[in-house]
Amino acid sequence: QLQLVESGGGLVQPGGSLRLSCTTSGFTLNNAAIGWFRQAPGKEREGVSCISNRVDSTDSADSVKGRFTISRDNARNTVSLQMNSLKPEDTGLYYCAASPMLVGLCVLHPREYNYWGQGTRVTVSS
């Protein structure tokens, strides 16, 4: 059974950093594109960053470019999201998701992802 579990969320001051992890099981990590998404209260879920299978190409939302970095460790079945220079508007519930159907690319549209974790909460506040 394919599962994803997020960890690493918490409360951080503006300008601080957090590292989120998405630990996967039930499938070969390198066979799926992985995306990170977030949802703030009262807002729709939005794509943050993603990494493709096989070639590890990445994409990120304009709002996080230069601040967030996504990476994959196939040996540990983990995809990480390093978040630096955090802003209050980065606050939300962060989810990772997998798409075995995307090959060699990734996209930031939630509807393209079939499997989801339960989320980890990030709060950026002074």
Image (cartoon, grey):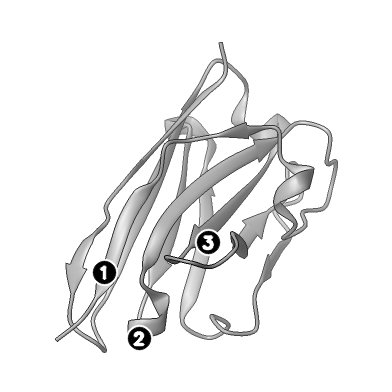
Q: Residue furthest left?
A: 126
Secondary structure of the residue carrying tag 3 is strand
In x, y percent, where is residue 103? Answer: 85, 41
Which is closer to the viewer, label 2 or label 3? 2
Left or right, 84 with reference to 44:
left
**Which of pointers 1 and 3 lies earlier in the amino acid sequence?**
3
Q: Amino acid at mark 1?
A: Thr
As drawn, the label of residue 70 is 3
Q: Residue at x 66, y 34 (%)?
A: 30
Q: Which mark is residue 123?
A: 1
Calculate the distance from the C-alpha at mark 1 to the C-alpha at mark 2: 9 Å
Residue closer to the observer: 73 or 67: 67
Q: Position of residue 28 (x, y in %)?
A: 62, 23
**Would you name the residue on which mark 2 appears?**
87
Going from N to C along the chain, the mark reached first, 1 or 2, is 2
Above or below, 76 against 13 in this view is above
Q: CA distance from mark 1 to mark 3?
A: 19 Å
Q: Secondary structure at mark 2?
A: loop
Residue drawn where x is 66% and y is 54% of the image: 51
Question: Relative to 85, is 94 on the left or the right?
Answer: right
For the N terminus, the image quarter is: top right
Earlier-in-chain disc, 2 versus 3: 3
Disc nearest the viewer among 1 and 3: 1
Which amino acid, by three-letter code, is at mark 3?
A: Ile
Residue 92 position (above or below residue 24): below
| C-alpha distance separating marks 2 and 3 | 18 Å
Quadrant in the rendering for residue 107: bottom right
Q: Residue at x 20, y 81 (%)?
A: 125
Where residue 44 sits, quadrant-wise, is bottom right
Question: Which quarter of the rendered picture does the C terminus lie within?
Answer: bottom left
